[in-house]
Amino acid sequence: MTEREGVIKFQLDYQPLPAPPADTALLASWRAILQKLELLGQLADRYQGLGFGNLSQRQGRGFLITGSQTSGLARLTEAEYAWVASFDLANNRLVAQGLVRPSSESLTHAAIYAHNPLIQTVMHVHSPLIWRQALALGLPSTDPDIAYGTPAMALAVQALLADDGLPGVFAMGGHEDGVVAYGQNCQAAGECLLGTLARAMALDGENST
């Protein structure tokens, strides 16, 4: 579980052009909440000091996603978002544009959006507490042997979502502390994630008494 954060593993066809304009106000508000809870950000004592976590929202035929290694920034401007215009999961390929490259987790986000057109928001965070309690919480989890940012992970994610309703949360077994929430909008995905965190905290409290 010592895989280096932020490594882009997919084939990226990237153009350094501005991403299409979009209303990201609600996404930014949830990002601020997740930063305060240290579910997203950049901390010297975690993950070799690299940024962790990323958010996205459906945009046109693709999706808008926070740029690679932007999690430590207090606020994001349009310049810190990339637009994934298209993707090919089987061939591990993304086509994107923006003034920053898309997050290394973009292929996982793509798999979720491809699975269900009703999904509008995806939140990938790092929660040691939820991740450790995934089994007790009854959360779906990908195989620990499957690395993030790979076609195998994309296919595993889609298999987890096959019979799930909205919103939902799952753990990334092979990506230390990795947890993903998704929903029909920012509010649904965010509230589902925080509800899961509350349940994990309750379990942790029971185990420590």
Image (tube, rainbow, N blue to C red):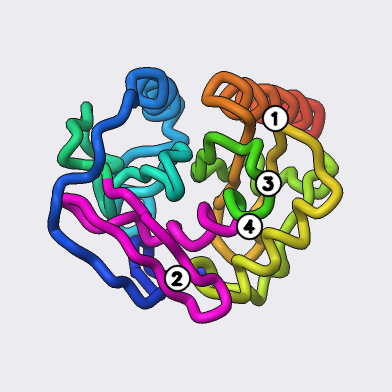
Task: Give the mark nearer the N terminus: 3 vs 2.
Answer: 2
Cβ atoms under marks 4 and 1 closer than 8 Å: no
Report the mark closest to the observer, 3 or 2. 3
Report the mark closest to the observer, 3 or 1. 3
Residue 91 appears left or right of 51: right
Which residue is at the front of the view, 200 or 79?
79
Task: Give the mark nearer the N terminus: 4 vs 2.
Answer: 2
Identify the amino acid type marked 3.
Answer: Asn
- Quarter of the image for residue 138 reads top right
Task: Give the mark nearer the N terminus: 3 vs 1.
Answer: 3
Is residue 194 among what the camera can see?
yes
The numbered disc on residue 172 is: 4
The numbered disc on residue 3 is: 2
Residue density around tag 1, few if under 14, some if 14–19, many if 20 or more, within 10 Å: many
Residue 154 appears left or right of 52: right
Which residue is at the front of the view, 200 or 188?
188
Identify the amino acid type marked 1.
Answer: Thr
Cβ atoms under marks 3 and 2 closer than 8 Å: no
Q: Name the residue under label 3.
A: 116
Is residue 44 among what the camera can see?
no
Residue density around tag 2, few if under 14, some if 14–19, many if 20 or more, within 10 Å: few
Q: Name the residue under label 1.
A: 196
Task: Give the mark nearer the N terminus: 4 vs 3.
Answer: 3
Residue 121 lies, in percent from the top left, at 53, 35
Magenta-tinted stretch: 82-111
Cβ atoms under marks 4 and 2 closer than 8 Å: no
